[in-house]
Image (cartoon, grey):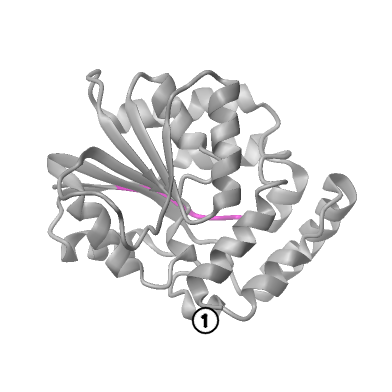
Amino acid sequence: MDVKSSVGLYWDRRSQTYDRNVYKSQSAAEHFWKSILKTEIGTEKNLNILDVGTGTGFLALLFAELGHKVTGIDISKGMLEKSRYNAERLSLTVNFMHGDAENLPFDDRSFDIVMNRYLLWTLPDPKTAVNEWSRVVKSGGKLILIDGRWHDPAIHMRLRRFLGSIIVFLTEKRNPGMFTSHYATIKDQLPFFNGITPNGVVDLFTEVGLKKITVNNLEKLRAFETKNRPLSYKIANKPYLFLALGEK
């Protein structure tokens, strides 16, 4: 099985439990994320937006609620089933599609905004992916990427992740070891498995010709995540989150 198929298989399996216990208050999280998205979009116009690696549709559905035309693409069919269910439950229209973030099935300059959240670490060829995302952005449009440093290999963070996994097992009744065992054989083929720095993303954006590149350190988001995530997340994760934006 190749790397992409293996990644898709993991998220197919994970899709059944992914939305559980993500935030203490889902409505508070949605309100907070909407404020971030509205600030970065910077316009009240209805836009054509692509959410790459849409997962269960969290960002795509928020964009739809804000009145935009939204397409969400993901390599995991299981995640897409969940995203379509969520859209139907909320009576929202989003075009959810199965596809590859590194080989998008869209014409050049198709979208006003291309966005993704916490995706780069899952990709075997992130440079190709960023080039694809830039390709489908219209002239004057924006590429927005939210990411951070995730799997810190330091000993104290390994211990924290172990403790967090015990809490997950006890409180969420799921096997946290599934992630470790599944990614053990492919993580060396994922260049940003441990995460990426803002400078690393700026370099990627620069290489594909994006302009007016800015980085937001999302300090308010980190504070919100710390306050509103479950105990297992707080123990196991101390990611450095940021938002990078580049214009076509």
Amino acid on which the number 1 mark rests in the picture = Asp
Q: How many numbered markers are drawn?
A: 1
- Magenta highlight on residue 227: no
- Local SS, label 1: helix
Q: Identify whether 138 is placed above or below 120.
A: above
As drawn, is 160 to the left or to the right of 109? right
Q: In which quarter of the image is residue 6?
A: bottom right
Which quadrant of the structure image shows residue 202?
bottom left
Query: Nearest the camera: 217 or 25?
Result: 25
Q: Give the range drawn in magenta.
A: 237-244
Front position in the image: 84 or 67? 84
Q: Quadrant of residue 205?
A: bottom left
**Which residue carries the number 1 mark?**
188
Q: Is residue 237 visible?
A: no
Is 47 located above or below residue 143 in the figure? Answer: above
Residue at the image point whose x is 73% and y is 41% from the top: 230
The residue depicted at 35 percent of the width and 32 percent of the height is: 70
Q: Point out residue 14 in the picture as x, y percentages from the top left corner.
A: 67, 54
Residue in view at x 86 percent, y 49 percent:
173
Residue 41, compared with residue 140, is above or below; it is: above
Question: Looking at the image, can residue 125 be seen?
Answer: yes
Give the left or right position of residue 203, taking residue 64 as reference.
left
Tell me residue 44's x, y (percent): 25, 18
- The image shows residue 89 at horizontal and vertical percentages of 60, 22
Circle 1 crowding by C-alpha within 10 Å: few under 14, some 14–19, many from 20 = few
Q: In which quarter of the image is the N terminus?
A: bottom right
